[in-house]
Image (cartoon, rainbow, N blue to C red):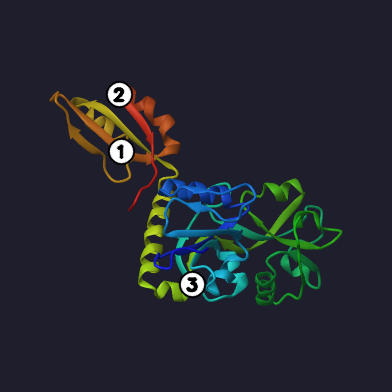
């Protein structure tokens, strides 16, 4: 990460692994182009004021806290697990497969005799989230042995562990491995974090806040689309009553005084049912278009 000593640069850590694809997509919608070679850990931004590294989300809190990197994207889970001093700049609710929080859960085999957390007294639990798991059971007053898992955690019960604490988004992996959930340990979302010293730097803070604004805008637009259409004035009320707009529809006059143009931002999931209704209500020239950012 060398460069001109007069150039201001914000050093950012991006998560390598499961979050990488969705993170790159979010940055692209926010207006940043990122390129990285198949075997490279150094992403290149089209913004000369950004320099990055691809590293595992588990490590990002440490490197940001130590000041080796100014900011980073990591999970709330790994911030808590590491117990380091960082600034939580922004909550960015996205994951590998959707725009939702993820959960760390206690899980046991479907046919296990263990029915409650209390039944885990004296048992062995495998997990990557060791410190959080220990603290969770300590607050419950349950004595367990917690062992770090190097991966493939779902296959360890019952032979190598009595239970696991594992990260889930949809729960499909647990079901595939015939595991059932006892309880949620922690709910986690992706966080934009900053080194405290970097946060006090006016230029770096402003650059970080600008980035957070654009990333939030990209996420806000992820499940929205724009609709615009031509509407006879005689049908306007009927059509506007069908529109679940973000605020209120934008209505513009046309050269033909009997018609107006109507434009709205709506949830993408309702469009397929809405468009036929709009056409039957008299709308014409209906255009659906994707959005990159919505800034509230």
Q: Secondary structure at mark 3?
A: loop
Q: Position of residue 86 (x, y in %)?
A: 51, 73
> Looking at the image, which residue is at 77% across and 62% down?
163
Dot 3 surroundings within 10 Å: few (below 14), some, or many (20 or more)?
Answer: many
For image coordinates 56% across by 59% down, the residue present is 53
Of badges 3 and 1, the one in the foreground is: 3
Residue receiving disc 3? 195
Whole-number angstrom distance, CA of label 2 to CA of label 3: 51 Å
- Give the class, few, some or many, for how many residues have Cα within 10 Å of label 1's Cα (few <14, many ≥20): many
Within the image, what quadrant is residue 222 found in?
A: top left
Please, is residue 3 above or below residue 269 in the view?
A: below
Q: Tell me where residue 181 appears, x and y as whole percent.
A: 70, 56
Q: CA distance from mark 3 to mark 1?
A: 40 Å
Q: Are marks 2 and 3 in contact (CB under 8 Å)?
A: no
Separation of residues labelled 1 and 2 (CA atoms): 14 Å
Q: Earlier in the sequence, mark 3 or mark 1?
A: 3
- Numbered mark located on residue 285 in the image: 2
Q: Where's residue 35, x and y in %?
A: 52, 47
SS class of the residue under badge 2? strand
- Of label 2 and label 3, which has the lower sequence position? 3
* Residue 206 falls left or right of residue 240: right
Residue 75: give x, y in percent of width and height. Answer: 56, 62
Looking at the rendering, which quadrant does residue 284 occupy? top left
Residue at position x 67%, y 73% in the image: 131
Q: Secondary structure at mark 1?
A: strand
Q: Label 1 belongs to which residue? A: 264
């Amino acid at each position: 990460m060398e460069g001109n000593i007069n150039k201001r640069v914000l050093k950012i850590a991006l998560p390598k692994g499961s979050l990488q694809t969705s993170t790159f997509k979010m940055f692209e919608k926010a207006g940043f182009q990122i390129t990285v070679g198949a075997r490279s850990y150094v992403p290149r931004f089209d913004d000369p004021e950004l320099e990055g590294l691809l590293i595992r989300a588990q490590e990002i809190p440490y490197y940001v806290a130590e000041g080796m990197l100014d900011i980073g994207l990591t999970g709330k889970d790994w911030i808590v697990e590491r117990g380091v001093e960082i600034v939580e700049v922004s909550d960015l609710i996205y994951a590998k497969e959707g725009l939702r929080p993820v959960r760390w859960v206690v899980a046991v085999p479907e046919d296990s005799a263990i029915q409650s957390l209390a039944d885990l007294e004296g048992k062995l639990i495998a997990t990557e989230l060791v410190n959080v798991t220990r603290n969770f059971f300590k607050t419950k007053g349950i004595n367990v042995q917690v062992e770090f898992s190097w991966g493939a955690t779902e296959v360890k019960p019952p032979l190598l562990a009595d239970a696991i604490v594992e990260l889930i988004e949809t729960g499909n992996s647990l079901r595939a491995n015939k595991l059932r959930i006892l309880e949620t340990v922690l709910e986690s979302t992706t966080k934009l974090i900053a080194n405290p010293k970097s946060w006090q730097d006016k230029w770096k803070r402003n650059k970080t806040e600008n980035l957070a604004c654009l990333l939030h805008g990209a996420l806000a637009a992820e499940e929205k689309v724009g609709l615009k259409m031509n509407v006879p004035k005689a049908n306007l009320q009927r059509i506007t009553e069908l529109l679940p707009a973000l605020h209120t529809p934008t209505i513009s006059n046309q050269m033909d005084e009997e018609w107006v143009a109507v434009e709205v931002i709506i949830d993408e999931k309702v469009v397929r049912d809405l468009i036929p209704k709009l056409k039957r209500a008299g709308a014409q020239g209906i255009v659906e278009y994707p959005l990159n950012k919505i800034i509230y």
